[in-house]
């Protein structure tokens, strides 16, 4: 079921939205809390996109040693003694980060619904350490020192429910690490598609700002203890704690800032696309050269 089937915002229950994108699917911005999400009226179209391999998993599954090292550096201060720490990664993909965490001395477990990806993850970290399922079907007696969500939270259709499922998996002094795309960058909203930055990813069911992410976790009993940003990503660390979703009060004014930023983003993406099209015109002869075309 579509998360917008009720017609209400998942985060604040509001029902007044601004449309940011309206093609095969819609991206909406909640005027009360500034949460952005895909609110497709037609699920058939959305399904089609989900099965479009063009989008899914390309970045996530790329073996990227540098990103893995940076993520280990990000996690390290919170798990300074990794030995025997229990770490759960939800949506571990092909398990490259999970393997790196295991190499630090931690005991790891990964959840990955994709069978081909989970097989690769299993071959890296041990098949007994990977569960091929959705989080809602995951069963364990272990309580974890850390739960890691790397570019998976924005794909989850029921984030509030997901957080309620994560909460009991985490020790009271444990940490929840969440990395999602940085909305405040040109790659945060639009994805590159056939060279052009003009489509939001239909797989990103929610587009978070730091404010909406902190509010959503706050509502589910997680307290934000650190935030870091780079060009593509935002990385936030949470621990079980008090509801500090006071942000919600100012969400309505914040929405105007998000909207203004979106207009800037749209303009920048438009300029990029224009430059791309012009360059393509100049390069046209090279692309159609039969000597290189069939390689
Ligand atoms: Zn809302």
Image (cartoon, helix red, strand yellow):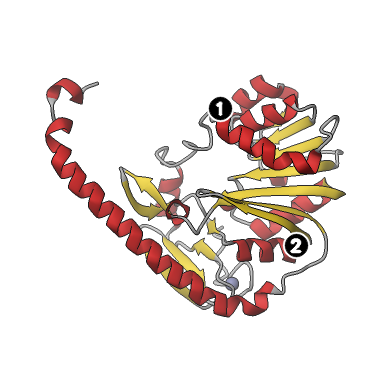
Q: In the rendered image, which residue does mark 2 sit on? A: 220
- Residue 224's place in the image compared with 99, above or below, is below
Task: Verify CB contact (< 8 Å) between mark 2 and mark 1.
Answer: no
* Image quadrant containing the C terminus: top left
The picture places residue 178, in percent across and down from the top left corner, at 66, 49
Question: How far apart are the alpha carbons under marks 2 and 1?
Answer: 32 Å
Which quadrant of the view contains residue 92?
A: top right
Which residue is pictured at 57% across the width and 62% down the height? 209
Left or right: 192 in relation to 124? left
In front here: 87 or 116? Answer: 87
Q: Secondary structure at mark 2?
A: loop
Left or right: 30 in relation to 138? left
- Quarter holding ligand 1: bottom right
- Residue 294's place in the image compared with 262, above or below, is above
The picture places residue 48, in percent across and down from the top left corner, at 41, 47
Packing grade of label 2 (10 A; few <14, some 14-19, many >=20) is many
Q: In the rendered image, which residue does mark 1 sit on? A: 116
Q: Secondary structure at mark 1?
A: helix
The picture places residue 176, in percent across and down from the top left corner, at 74, 49
Which residue is pictured at 11% across the width and 34% down the height? 285
Closer to the camera: disc 2 or disc 1?
Answer: 2
Tally of numbered tags: 2
Which residue is pictured at 82% across the width and 65% down the height? 242
The picture places residue 180, in percent across and down from the top left corner, at 58, 50
- Residue 282's place in the image compared with 161, above or below, is above
Which residue is pictured at 54% across the width and 72% down the height? 7
């Amino acid at each position: 079921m579509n998360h917008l089937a009720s017609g209400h915002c998942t985060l604040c229950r509001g029902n007044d939205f601004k449309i940011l994108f309206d093609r095969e699917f819609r991206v909406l911005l909640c005027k009360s809390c500034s949460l952005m999400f895909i609110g497709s009226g037609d699920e058939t179209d959305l399904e089609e996109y989900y099965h479009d391999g063009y989008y899914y998993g390309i970045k996530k599954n790329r073996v990227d040693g540098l990103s893995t090292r940076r993520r280990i550096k990000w996690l390290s201060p919170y798990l300074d003694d990794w030995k025997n720490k229990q770490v759960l990664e939800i949506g571990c993909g092909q398990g490259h980060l999970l393997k790196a965490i295991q190499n630090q001395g931690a005991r790891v477990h990964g959840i990955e619904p994709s069978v081909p990806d989970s097989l690769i993850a299993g071959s890296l970290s041990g098949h007994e350490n990977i569960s091929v399922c959705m989080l809602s079907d995951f069963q364990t007696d272990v309580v974890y020192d850390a739960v890691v969500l790397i570019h998976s939270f924005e794909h989850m259709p029921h984030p509030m429910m997901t957080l309620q499922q994560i909460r009991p998996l985490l020790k009271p002094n444990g940490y929840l690490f969440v990395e999602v795309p940085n909305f405040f960058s040109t790659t945060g909203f639009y994805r590159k598609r056939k060279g052009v930055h003009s489509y939001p990813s239909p797989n990103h069911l929610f587009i978070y700002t730091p404010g909406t992410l902190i509010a959503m976790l706050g509502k589910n009993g997680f307290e934000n203890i650190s935030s870091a940003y780079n060009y593509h990503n935002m990385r936030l660390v949470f621990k079980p704690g008090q509801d500090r979703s006071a942000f919600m009060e100012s969400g309505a004014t914040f929405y105007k800032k998000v909207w203004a930023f979106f207009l800037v983003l749209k303009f920048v993406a438009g300029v990029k696309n224009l430059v791309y099209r012009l360059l393509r015109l100049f390069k046209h002869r090279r692309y159609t050269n039969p000597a290189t075309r069939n390689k």
